């Protein structure tokens, strides 16, 4: 049925081009678009997000759905589940999606160890699978390669975000940072989640980048904030109330950086003056906080490019074209210097409102 429709559309487009006498370039482009749009309207995509309350993953997921819709997928056929940060919930959601007859899966795994079981379920049912945001282990990726599975990972290298955070701190200058003038930067580290690749690399590389530039660092507090604003606020407030005085708070993401700012303000200190704060993601609220001077810098975690590449990977599999088993993206540094440029770039590259069913 679907094939017939595609055929009719190609024929109609060819007839149209002959009638109006288009140049060969237009003749090639027009029918291709018509084929793509019509061919995905009946295609079902199943999506699992490790935890839907995660601010960054919400942005990511909205963009993913909008982009798929812009490519001709029907919103009703994109089924999104939040996995409540639970392996067993995620696994049963994957089974449910397979039972519901999805043609492709896009999975933000709860952790890297759940990936093997998800891959097995998808592969044994002949369903192409794209992992996003949380990279499965090297061993798991090797399996996709060795067995030629239609499975890939789309994401950024978190080491780069850590390095960029370190560079943003260095750009502030030691004189500015070292409020107590002891030649050492006292800092708090607020980490994402235990055993999470992004959290581990960001923690390690932000600090090593600063230290490698010859700046001495002293860690006053290192806690896990679970990527969450309120948790981070409580942790930073607790540290401050114990009399610890950091000059810098490094957070593995923006939600936690915003929480740190909340705590600093509630402690009657001035963020961006008494204590500097850096994050990762470039959430809209952080962009505003950079403009206000509350946050010194963040690293744009390009959810637009990542979600588009994940959707493109799905389309490649559906068309039988295949994908590399790792699809990377670059981070970008954001500070007061370029915040306007980044904001415009984000606004221009998003897919807009894909909320309309088609
Ligand atoms: C990171 C992101 C965090 C959080 C995390 C979830 O890449 O910076 O904000 O969403 O992914 O795994």
Image (cartoon, rainbow, N blue to C red):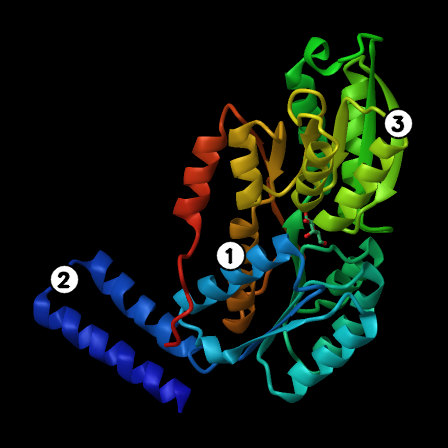
Residue at the (73%, 55%) spot, across then down: 134
Mark 2 lies on residue:
22
Mark yes or no: residue 120 visible.
no
Which secondary structure lies at badge 2? loop
The image quarter containing residue 103 is bottom right
Residue at the (13%, 71%) spot, across then down: 18
Mark yes or no: residue 275 visible.
yes
Q: Nearer the viewer, mark 1 or mark 2?
A: 1
How far is the residue under mark 1 from the one under mark 2? 31 Å
Q: Percent from the top left, x then y, of residue 38?
A: 36, 77
Callout 1–callout 3 Cβ contact below 8 Å: no
Q: Quadrant of the N terminus?
A: bottom left
Q: Which mark is residue 243?
A: 3
* Horizontal relation, residue 107 to residue 309: left or right: right
Residue at the (74%, 64%) spot, across then down: 109
The image quarter containing residue 57 is bottom right
Q: Nearer the viewer, residue 234 or 208?
A: 234
Which secondary structure lies at badge 1? helix
Mark closest to the chain's N terminus, 3 or 2: 2
The image quarter containing residue 220 is top right
Callout 1–callout 2 Cβ contact below 8 Å: no
Mark 3 Cα-neighbour bin, 10 Å: few <14, some 14–19, many ≥20: few
Q: Which mark is residue 308?
A: 1
Up-down relation of residue 123 to residue 139 (above or below)? below
Q: Percent from the top left, x then y, of residue 313?
A: 56, 62
How far is the residue under mark 3 from the one under mark 2? 75 Å
Q: Nearer the viewer, mark 3 or mark 2?
A: 3
Up-down relation of residue 52 to residue 11 (above or below)? above
Up-down relation of residue 263 to residue 352 (above or below)? above
Q: Percent from the top left, x then y, of residue 358?
A: 37, 77
Q: Percent from the top left, x then y, of residue 106?
A: 63, 67
Q: Nearer the viewer, residue 80 or 328?
A: 80
């Amino acid at each position: 049925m679907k094939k017939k429709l595609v055929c009719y559309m190609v024929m109609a487009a060819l007839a149209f081009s002959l009638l109006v006498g288009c140049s060969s370039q237009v003749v090639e482009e027009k029918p291709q678009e018509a084929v793509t749009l019509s061919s995905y309207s009946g295609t079902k995509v199943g999506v699992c997000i490790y935890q839907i309350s995660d601010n960054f993953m919400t942005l990511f997921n909205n963009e993913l759905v909008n982009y798929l819709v812009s490519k001709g997928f029907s919103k009703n056929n994109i089924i999104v589940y939040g996995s409540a940060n639970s392996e067993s919930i995620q696994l049963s959601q994957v089974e449910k999606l397979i039972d519901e007859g999805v043609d492709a899966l896009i999975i933000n795994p709860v952790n890297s160890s759940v990936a093997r079981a998800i891959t097995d379920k998808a592969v044994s049912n002949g369903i192409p699978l794209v992992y996003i945001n949380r990279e499965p282990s090297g061993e798991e990726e090797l399996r996709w390669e060795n067995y030629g599975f239609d499975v890939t990972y789309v994401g950024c290298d978190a080491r780069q975000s850590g390095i960029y955070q370190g560079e943003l701190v260095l750009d502030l200058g030691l004189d500015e940072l070292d409020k107590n003038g002891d030649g050492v930067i006292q800092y708090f580290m607020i980490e994402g989640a235990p055993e999470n690749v992004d959290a581990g690399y960001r923690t390690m590389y932000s600090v090593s980048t600063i230290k490698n530039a010859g700046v001495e660092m002293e860690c006053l507090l290192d806690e896990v904030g679970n990527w969450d604003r309120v948790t981070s606020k409580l942790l930073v407030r607790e540290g401050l109330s114990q009399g610890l005085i950091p000059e810098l708070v490094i957070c593995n993401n923006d939600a936690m950086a915003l929480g740190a700012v909340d705590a600093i303000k509630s402690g009657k200190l001035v963020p961006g003056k008494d204590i500097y704060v850096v994050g990762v993601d470039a959430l809209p609220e952080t962009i505003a906080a950079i403009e206000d001077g509350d946050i010194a810098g963040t690293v744009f975690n390009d959810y637009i490019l990542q979600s588009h590449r994940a959707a493109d990977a799905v389309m490649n599999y559906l068309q039988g074209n295949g994908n590399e088993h790792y699809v990377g993206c670059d981070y970008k540094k954001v500070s007061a210097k370029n915040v306007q440029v980044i904001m415009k770039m984000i606004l221009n590259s998003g897919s807009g409102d894909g909320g309309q069913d088609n």
